[in-house]
Amino acid sequence: MKSTSRTFSVTAAALTVATVCLGALTAAQQQSKGLPGANSSNFRPFNQITKANVSQLQMAWFYPYGAPTFSPVYANNMVYGLGRNNSALVALDATTGKEVWVHEGLNGITSKGINYWESADGKDRRLIFAVDSFLQEIDATTGKSILSFGTNGITDMRVGLPRAEGTSLRVMPASPGRIWRNTIIFGGQAGEQIMTPPGDIRAYDVLTGKLVWQFHTVPRPGEFGYETNPPDGWKYIGGANNWGEMSVDDERGIVYIPTGSATADFWGADRHGQNLFANSLLALDVRTGKRLWHFQTVHHDLWDLDNVSAPQLVTANHNGQRVDVVALAGKTGFLYVFNRQTGAPIWPIEERPVMKGEVPGEWYSPTQPFPTKPPAFARQSFTEDDVNPNLLTKEEYEALKLRVRNARNGTGPQGGLFVPTQLNGDSISMPGNQGGSNWGTTAGDPQRGFVFVAGVNQVAVLRVNDIEDPALAQGRRGGGGGNQVNMGQVNQGQRAFAQYCAACHGADLKPAIPGVPSLLGVNDRIDEESMRVIVSEGRNNMRPILDVTNEDIRAIYAWLTVMNPAGRGGAGRGRGAGVPLPPGPVVASGGAPKPALPARYGGPFFPGVGGTTGNMPWPTDVDAAKLTKRYQSGYNVMATSTKPPYTTITAYDLNTGDIKWQVPNGDDPATVERTTTGGPCDAAVPCTTTGVHDTGGVGARNGMIVTGTGLLFQNGKDGWARAYDVDTGKVLWKGKTAGQSIGIPEMYMSNGRQYIVFMSPPVTPGSVAGAQGGGNSAAPVNPTGPYGYIAFALPR
């Protein structure tokens, strides 16, 4: 771990604007107003709801059009969220849930949330977000676009980003970023294949929209870390991006940013070396973008072990002193804990030898970092004894046990970590690329030194295949830019859809069997990332597709985009099934007007088609001859094939470095209903009706809220919100919701009453939400209960 500092791409004029400090709220002022802070702890100091009275919570209101993947934000007796077909920002009365204003037509908006900014005098209040890579703002009071921001209300986030500027790529982050004073910091999300853009961290001025600084996550010549990549690597290596959360130490002015893997996932023959600053925790000076320190959790990632969840900033007792620490939960299942100021590990992190693979041309790091403390929160090994008997037929159960038995695997309690992939053979990866900690799954009590992690246990059986890379092939042919529709990919998607999907969803995208959702307009409902998770993990009655590759999933999504011309592809938002929406207080539509692309760049936008598939031409000055072939693996996640508990909530006491408690994260109804004690059940061996409880929800990655009265709130995937005792893990309250939420709950005080708001999709027979747990935010027909945004409070 190095501590050398260097300033990257700082614009002096922009810094002058940022340091004037035009009256933004401080952290203390934010807390006094009940606003969530930028430290991402999800901690609320409110004391009205306590362990003694939490059992009395009851539903106060629900807003049926709220998006379950979008985290609401509270400010000044208003709740701001996404609703009305997942394409409108709405302002709701915080005590009644009634619409105050609606700004519709925001298709393509940031999918996981927005940021709220307020001047110190409270007169200037702004909601900050991106739509199709265009950063923009809305007046939080009126709901109308702020056209003085940027250029005519727009800042193009592709400007200055290699392989993105002047294209139709969607490089906007899925997460809302974080605000410090008058500066908003963003990561980015532009794909995970070869020749996609790097994940540079950018900071913009909240008032003007001007770039303040830019940090290169793939270092350029002369910059720190450049030698950890090939000499020409900065010309083509992408990723190393922050698509998840980040946290800001307000007093120190440090932003802590977790980063994901470098491109391409599962293959790194063109990026020999440790690949800074991929898979790292970055500590940057929020004023300048200067690197203060970093730690890389995975060297030369070949498993897609991104760092995603919010670093937790807490203060703990260590060696007789109070120490400010930052704790990062990883997909590896480890919690990495550092001194917040210096980056020194609180407990030793050892570089240990790991296995080396033999995929042609690949480079393997000889060691990987292993924390000696705290203990892991997720399972890190997987053998045939860990295959789930509850949700598989006897034939499936035996076949998977044999596959795991014959796969490359490690030994010991951490044997599933860093197992090298092999060509045309299986390798075990545990917790897997969708396991461990992910977006929205951490929270903390800053003063007591507690950190909470929602962890996922689900093995991935990686299988590397021999293919020709489309970007390299196009580079040899002298192909065009990244914003063109890749018809080869579309044709591939049509073939893959016929193979994997048509039997249930129909060749015409209309259900071929009862109870299966229609895929007409599916690109308006879910984005490519969500489709990948659905396909790889399964949803309710839909089993995971075990052997479909990531390339096929991308290709299917591209084909569906072409088949649904009214869709917005990568927007991930749109019209859901249900009854027509009632009239509402619409004050504006469409956001700030988007500028047209110059004709030479291809004109219209095709989000999710050409932009995120590695369809850029190979650099003409980089020799690609040795890379005429590349190797890939699908995500190959086997969520329901992993023995429960599928997910857990772990409480860490960082005063001791120990696990305080760990409990299953709710239940999985299918496992409870279909359980035997002796193995898989089928026609010959009927399922018992007793069930096995405390299974955790399959893939339940749901956000948490922690209170000053010692409560932890979370909505489980089984349709129950819960309040846990932070000292024991005991469930003190359960409240009924319609289904799981992917977003982070919100808690606030309004007119003297404390509220907790959860997000939940409507569950109706045959709906997308009912069949897949998806993001439908139109009103359903005959809903099973409260849905959308659901607020609970104590009785008046």
Image: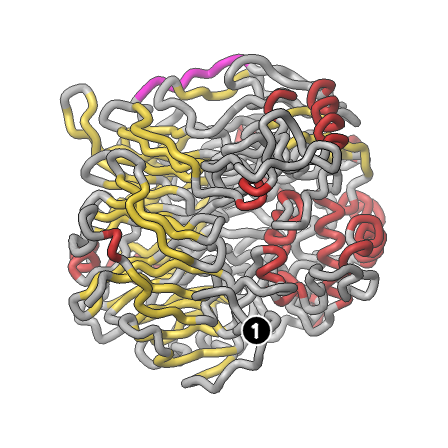
For disc 1, the marked residue is 781
Q: Where is residue 16 drawn, in percent x and y?
A: 29, 59
Give the residue drawn at x 52%, y 47%.
199
Give the residue drawn at x 76%, y 63%.
511
Q: Which residues are magenta?
A: 347-353
- Residue 571, compared with residue 242, is above or below; it is below
The answer to which image quadrant residue 603 occupies is bottom right
Q: Where is residue 273 drawn, in percent x and y?
A: 58, 26
Q: Is residue 556 visible?
A: yes
Q: Quadrant of the C terminus?
A: bottom left
Using the image as rendered, state which of residue 587 and residue 236 is in the foreground. Answer: 587
- Residue 349, compared with residue 457, is above or below; it is above
- Disc 1 is placed on an element classified as loop
Q: Which residue type carries mark 1?
A: Val
Is residue 757 found inside the magenta-colored segment of the image?
no
How packed is label 1: few (under 14 Cα within 10 Å), some, or many (20 or more)?
A: some
Q: Is residue 268 visible?
A: no
Give the residue drawn at x 36%, y 57%.
184
Q: Answer left or right for 495 relative to 667.
A: right
